[in-house]
Image (tube, rainbow, N blue to C red):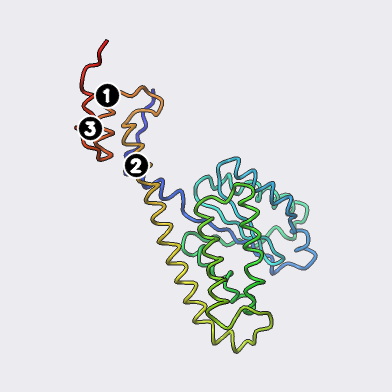
Amino acid sequence: MRPDRRTPAAAREQSLASEALHLLVIDYRRLSSEQRARLSFSQEEQLEWLRAAAARGASLVVLASEQRLEIYSTRARLSGALRGVLESLAQRTARNPAIGGLRVVEKTELMAARHLLRRASGIEHDGDVARAIAPIHAAAMLAGSSTALGLTLSALFRAAGNVSRRVRLETALGNRGVAPELIAIEAPSVERIVEEELAAWQAQEAEALRAKADACEAAVARQGSFAPDEPTSITRLRASLRAEGKPHSQNADLRRPQAG
């Protein structure tokens, strides 16, 4: 049986890295309106991407608009999350070589999270917070209904909703047709809200990741250097219980010879 060579520390590091946030932004703004129309994806097509990602155990949220396509996922099973989206894009660009040179921006972790929260604030939509948050909420709902949302993206999109709510309550923004002068005045307050919610999301995410990493580390400690399906010995059980910090006296039955 082939041994599992990961140490508990390596397993912990791998667990933390797998949940790192990942974002691809595909920019349509340099394309003509006709070319943009060719890159319009229906809700049914997006559902196919989401269901396929969920079937592969990957997290995925897609924000599609006339100006850009934003693909949110995590490092865990990233290729599985992106496969359907990239295949659809490849088909469209193969038929339309003129749009093959789309600008693609990759963002990870805090940069990706800040990108979404700033978008939710409405600062990029002339202060119209309702217009900004509506597609974000719809994308999260669609991913949730397809079981593709996952814990990391779920927490992030809740934070986006918090930003939108706070901007409406704590600033003079929130309505269509806000004067540019008012947007400029309120911009520092909006940025403060974004950073506060980003810090809150980061703290919540760190706690969740710590718990997951602890569980992964303990699982590897229980398995020792053997493959998961190899028979467990009493010695290994004792080592596992010690690694989890349980009093050794509670496990005297593991040392005592069994009757019969």
Q: Which residue is mark 3?
A: 250
Is disc 3 surrounded by few (<14), some (14 to 19) or many (20+) residues within 10 Å?
few
The circle on residue 135 is none
63 to the left or right of 19: right
Please name which of the two marks, 3 or 2, marks the residue nearer to the observer.
3
Considering the image in quadrants, where does the N terminus appear?
top left
Query: First in sequence: mark 3 or mark 2?
Result: 2
Residue 90: x and y in percent read: 70, 50
Query: First in sequence: mark 3 or mark 1?
Result: 1
242 to the left or right of 13: left
Q: Indicate the quadrant where residue 233 lies.
A: top left
- Label 1: which secondary element: helix
Q: Is residue 240 above or below residue 107?
A: above
Which residue type does callout 3 highlight? Answer: Gln
| Residue at x 53%, y 82% (from the top left corner) | 187
- 172 or 209: which is nearer to us? 172
Q: Indicate the quadrant where residue 142 lies.
A: bottom right
Which residue type does callout 2 highlight? Answer: Glu
| Residue at x 50%, y 77% (from the top left corner) | 191
User: Is there a contact, CB below 8 Å, between mark 3 and mark 1?
Assistant: no
Q: Which residue is mark 1?
A: 234
Please name which of the two marks, 3 or 1, marks the residue nearer to the observer.
3
Q: Which residue is mark 2?
A: 217
Which residue type does callout 1 highlight? Answer: Ile
